[in-house]
Image (cartoon, rainbow, N blue to C red):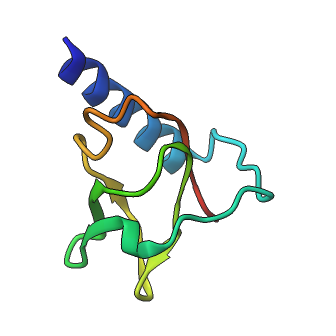
């Protein structure tokens, strides 16, 4: 059930990010790209190892645009209460 909730949350977040339905608070500090594992071929974040709290997903990692957030990036991370994608 937990995996299903994480999967659904990832789908909803990705859809909202792609349609521009999420307002982004630009006063939040972007998380360093080193806290993410990234597939540069398809522009997908595959995991997150940084601190909990509010997570800002960078618009780019190494000059490659983020296009997708993997469905299990935040699995098991009960300490993350929101995440946003930078513009």
Task: Check the image and name the residue furthest to the top.
Answer: 1
Q: Position of residue 66 (x, y in %)?
A: 41, 67
Q: Say whether residue 48 is left or right of residue 46.
A: right
Reply above or below: 7 against 30. Answer: above
Q: Position of residue 2 (x, y in %)?
A: 23, 17
Task: Check the image and name the residue furthest to the bottom.
Answer: 63
Reply above or below: 26 against 80. Answer: below
**How many tags in the picture?**
0
Query: Is 17 or 2 nearer to us in this picture?
Result: 2
Q: Residue at x 53, y 69 (%)?
A: 59
Task: Check the image and name the residue furthest to the right.
Answer: 27
Q: Residue at x 68, y 62 (%)?
A: 29
Q: Position of residue 11 (x, y in %)?
A: 34, 34
- Which quadrant would residue 33 be assigned to in this image? bottom left
- Which quadrant would residue 31 be assigned to in this image? bottom right
Q: Say whether residue 74 is left or right of residue 61.
A: left
Q: Position of residue 16 (x, y in %)?
A: 52, 38
In the rendered image, the quadrant that contains the C terminus is bottom right
Q: Say whether residue 78 is left or right of residue 80.
A: left
Q: Residue at x 41, y 57 (%)?
A: 50
In the rendered image, the quadrant that contains the N terminus is top left
Reply above or below: 1 against 13. Answer: above
């Amino acid at each position: 059930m937990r995996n299903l909730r994480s999967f659904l949350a990832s789908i909803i977040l990705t859809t909202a990010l792609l349609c521009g339905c999420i307002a982004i608070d630009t006063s939040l500090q972007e998380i360093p790209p080193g806290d993410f594992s990234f597939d540069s071929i398809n522009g997908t974040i595959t995991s997150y190892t940084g601190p909990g709290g509010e997570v800002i997903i960078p618009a780019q990692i190494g000059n490659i645009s983020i296009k997708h957030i993997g469905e299990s990036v935040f699995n098991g991370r009960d300490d993350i209460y929101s995440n946003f994608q930078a513009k």
